[in-house]
Image (cartoon, grey):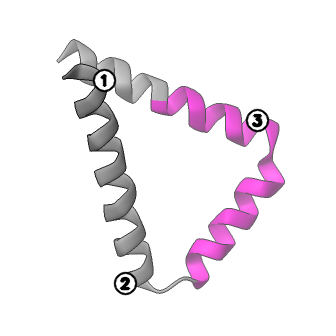
């Protein structure tokens, strides 16, 4: 459980840094996401989640 909370905290730090450093870029990404089809967003999300799971699996064994 400790690892999960740490990972969620790291996600919040990374997102916060992105919004602080490049707010215009984040707005652009949000507009782009609104114009992207649900299927494309779903597929991209699943691919990114699989890559993340693979990275955790490699690192943690």
Q: Report the number of discs.
A: 3
Marks 3 & 2, CB-CB < 8 Å contact: no
Marks 3 and 1 sit apart, C-alpha to C-alpha, by: 29 Å
**Principal secondary structure, stretch drawn in magenta:** helix
The CA distance from mark 1 to mark 2 is 30 Å
Instruction: Name the spot of residue 33 as percent of width and height, x first.
Output: 57, 73
Residue 28 counted in the magenta span: yes
Q: Nearer the viewer, mark 1 or mark 2?
A: 1
In magenta, the rendered stretch is 11-35
Identify the residue at image location x=71%, y=42%: 19
**For this view, does 51 lie left or right of residue 36?**
left
Q: Dividing the picture into quarters, in which one does residue 2 lie?
A: top left
**Dot 3: element:** helix
Residue assigned mark 3? 20
Label 3 to label 2: alpha-carbon separation: 30 Å
Give the SS element for disc 2.
helix
Label ID, residue 39: 2
Residue under the image location 42 percent in, 68 percent down: 44
Q: Give the residue pinned by disc 1.
A: 59
């Amino acid at each position: 459980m400790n690892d999960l909370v740490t990972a969620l905290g790291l996600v919040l730090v990374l997102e916060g840094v992105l919004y602080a450093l490049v707010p215009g870029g984040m707005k652009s990404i949000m507009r782009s996401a609104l114009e992207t089809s649900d299927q494309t967003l779903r597929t991209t999300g699943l691919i990114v989640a699989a890559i993340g799971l693979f990275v955790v699996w490699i690192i943690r064994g």
